[in-house]
Structures are given as C-alpha cells and as structure tokens.
Amino acid sequence: MAVRDVLTIGDPRLRQVSAAVERFDDPALPELLQDLRDTMAACAGAGLAAPQIGVPLRVVIFGITRNPRYPEAPSIPETVLINPVLTPLGKEIDDSAWEGCLSVPLWRARVPRWRRLHYRALDPQGQPFEREVEGFHARVVQHECDHLDGVLFPDRVPEGLPHG
Ligand code: NI
C-alpha cells in the first residue's frame, strides 16, 4: 500500500527496543505488513524490520528470490516473523559472509553470526510456527531480529575483520 522511508543510522528510533505485538485483530497489523513488503521490494532488500520504518513493534519480513544485492544467495520463501525467539543450534560461528543494511547505506562488513539456528514466531494470523535453518537464512534472521533490539550490524563487527 505504501513505500515508506527507511530510517538510517543516527536516527534514535533505530536504537529502541521494540514492543511485542499483542493484538492480531487490529487492522494496523496487515497495513504494517503490506508497507514492509512494499518498502522491501522497492529497496530490493533481503529483509526489513518494522523499526526501520519507524514502527517500534517486533515484526520482521524477509525473503529472497533473485536479489541483485545478494547475487550468490539461495532463495528464501517470503516469511513474516512476529515476536520471534531465536535459539542458536550448536556453537559454530560463521564470519565468512558480508552483510549490508538498508539503514546503514554504503557500508558492508563481514559479521559473525550463528551458523545454525532454531526460531519460533507468530505468523500474521497469530499462529505459532518454527523452523531450523542455517547459512544465509540463519544470517538474515539474526540480522533482522537484531533490529528489534536496536542493534545494527556494525555493532557486531569485531576489530580486525575487513569492512569497507
Ligand atoms: Ni538491516
């Protein structure tokens, strides 16, 4: 319904801890989801979190078909996560992949993330679901869910890893 402005680093709204969604019968929720979908498509993003468009709720959307920002990435079905909970599976860290963010223009970096992940969340109807994922899918989920706690990927870049 609307392509919204994406907030960029320096905006304090990106640093808030977002609130859980509690009502699934509120028409504002499907409107938010459509705005996230439209904005992600307009920006060719792999994912987008509600706080990035100034809505401090625990909602993210992600998905990849063929994305010019991530030409090597596998496809991921479009997924909405509401009130997600992430649990790493194993201790393996992957710091080999580069990340960018629509809220951090012109910057990419190698970011350490859990390689394998279990997540559970509510879908747009409020129904719980869960998945076990790895690799790029696990990375995208960790990146997007960080936004719900006010964390941006540069916060995760240790000294010594290349960036530019
Ligand atoms: Ni991001």
Image (tube, grey):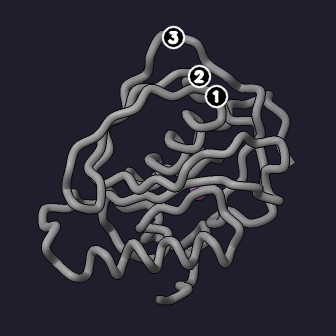
Residue 103 shown left or right of residue 30 in the figure: right
Q: Residue at x 51, y 72 (%)?
A: 37
Whether 22 is drawn above or below 146: the answer is below
Q: Which numbered disc, 1 or 2, marks the residue that appears first in the sequence? A: 2
Q: Quadrant of ligand 1?
A: bottom right
Q: Which numbered disc, 1 or 3, marks the residue that appears first in the sequence? A: 3
Spatial CA distance of label 1 from label 2 is 5 Å
Q: Circle 1 sits in a helix, a strand or a loop, which is it?
A: helix
Q: Nearer the viewer, mark 1 or mark 3?
A: 1
Whether 39 is drawn above or below 24: the answer is below
> Crowding at label 3, few (<14), some or many (≥20) Cα neighbours within 10 Å?
few
Q: Nearer the viewer, residue 37 or 14?
A: 37
Q: Circle 2 sits in a helix, a strand or a loop, which is it?
A: loop
Displayed quadrant of residue 136: top right
- Please, what is the three-letter code of the amino acid marked with disc 1? Gly
Residue 10 shown left or right of residue 13 in the figure: right
Q: Which residue is mark 1?
A: 135
The reply to whether the residue tagged 3 has its Cβ within 8 angstroms of ligand 1 is no
Q: Nearer the viewer, residue 26 or 56?
A: 26
Q: Which residue is mark 2?
A: 115
> Crowding at label 1, few (<14), some or many (≥20) Cα neighbours within 10 Å?
some
Q: Position of residue 59 (x, y in %)?
A: 36, 60
Q: Residue at x 46, y 80 (%)?
A: 35
Q: Nearer the viewer, mark 3 or mark 2?
A: 2
- Please, what is the three-letter code of the amino acid marked with disc 2? Arg
Displayed quadrant of residue 158: top right
Q: Which numbered disc, 3 or 2, marks the residue that appears first in the sequence? A: 3
Q: Which residue is mark 3?
A: 91
